Amino acid sequence: MTDTVTIDCTEYCMLIAADEMLADNTAFDRVTNDLRNGKDELVSEAFSNRILDGESPLKVFRELRNLSRTALAHRAGVHRVQITDIESGKSNGSVATMRKLAKALGVLVEDLV
């Protein structure tokens, strides 16, 4: 047999609200810590909207970092034409190339695909 506790509906709703507030506060603390420790960054609405509108994430992150295609190619150890082809949609880029580009930009591969 299990023990049970009966509480009124108002008290139950207050407990649910407190649990939701705790979850929100925990998420806020995690995001704040990730930003403070450099594990995450804030990206402006304008840059986010460019990706949401279908622009190449590689181009958006490259421009966010103020890098030319040549500078990114040098930093990543890939050919500039590969970057041009990926940004224009002519190529998806190999997994190895996307890893190099992501590392050079300081983002996850998932951010670029």
Image: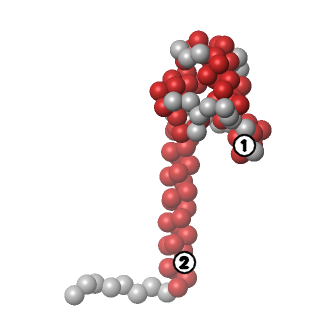
**As drawn, is 45 to the left or to the right of 26?**
right
Query: Which residue occupies the foreground of this view, 82 or 10?
Result: 82
The residue that appears at 50% across and 52% down in the rendered structure is 26
- Give the left or right position of residue 29, taking residue 45 as reference: left
The answer to whether mark 1 and mark 2 are in CB contact below 8 A is no
Q: Mark 2 points at which residue?
A: 13
Answer with mark 1 or mark 2, whichever residue precedes in sequence.
2
Which label sits on residue 42? none
Residue closest to the eye, 107 or 53: 53
Query: What's the residue at 55%, 21% (across, down)?
Result: 104
Quadrant including the N terminus = bottom left
Q: Mark 1 points at which residue?
A: 54
Q: Which residue is depicted at the point 52% across and 25% down?
A: 97
* Colour mapping: secondary structure
Quarter of the image holding residue 13? Answer: bottom right
Name the residue at the front extreme. Answer: 90
